Amino acid sequence: MSANSFRDNVSNTLDHAKVRARRAFRFTMWSLLIAGLLFCIGYYIYRNYTISEGTRTGTLFKISKKGVVFKTYEGQLHLVGSVMITSQSTWDFSAQNARVYEDLQKYEGKNVKCYYREKVDAFPWQGDTDYIVYKVEPFQ
């Protein structure tokens, strides 16, 4: 075996190893990207999943827009049937958007019926609570 054929053999082996390593690296990167994307989609669906829907009725006594990074609409309702305002007789909620917030401002101090969805764990831009009010109407 001559020196040139030995070098050619080693060179071919190294080139083949580089190609295999490049393919393995690409496969690993694509696999990680797809796995990360699937995880993010699943996590988003999980956090936005509605675990309950319903209504709450009471006197709306607080509605505000607050937040440092994410401005959200937060409110409190004094529930019907409770005489004193305690932590158990108030219901904290977040309004879904500016339209609902404006509707809530009209009814501050009045009896209202709030339609809400309870999320598993609301994202910070959705509000401070897991209860997201999407509709409000006056209640007699």
Image: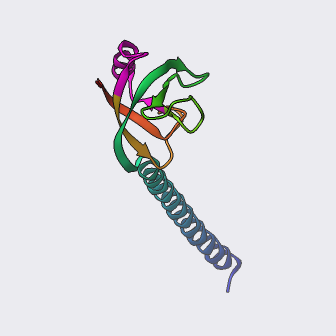
* 123 lies above or below 38: above
What quarter of the picture does the C terminus occupy?
top left
Task: Please give the name of the residue rendered at 58% of the width and 22% of the height, measured from the top-left corner.
Answer: 67
Task: Please give the name of the residue rendered at 56% of the width and 39% of the height, measured from the top-left corner.
Answer: 88
Q: Is residue 96 magenta?
A: yes
Picture coordinates of residue 124, whole percent (x, y): 54, 35
Task: Please give the name of the residue rendered at 67% of the width and 79% of the height, measured from the top-left corner.
Answer: 6
* 35 lies above or below 86: below
Front residue (pair 59, 42):
59
Q: Furthest-top residue in view?
A: 106
Q: Which residues are magenta?
A: 93-112
Task: Please give the name of the residue rendered at 33% of the width and 19% of the height, measured from the top-left corner.
Answer: 99
Q: Is residue 74 magenta?
A: no
Give the quadrant of residue 56.
top left
Q: Furthest-bottom residue in view?
A: 1
Picture coordinates of residue 94, whole percent (x, y): 46, 30
How did the renderer colour the structure?
A: rainbow
Picture coordinates of residue 126, whole percent (x, y): 47, 33
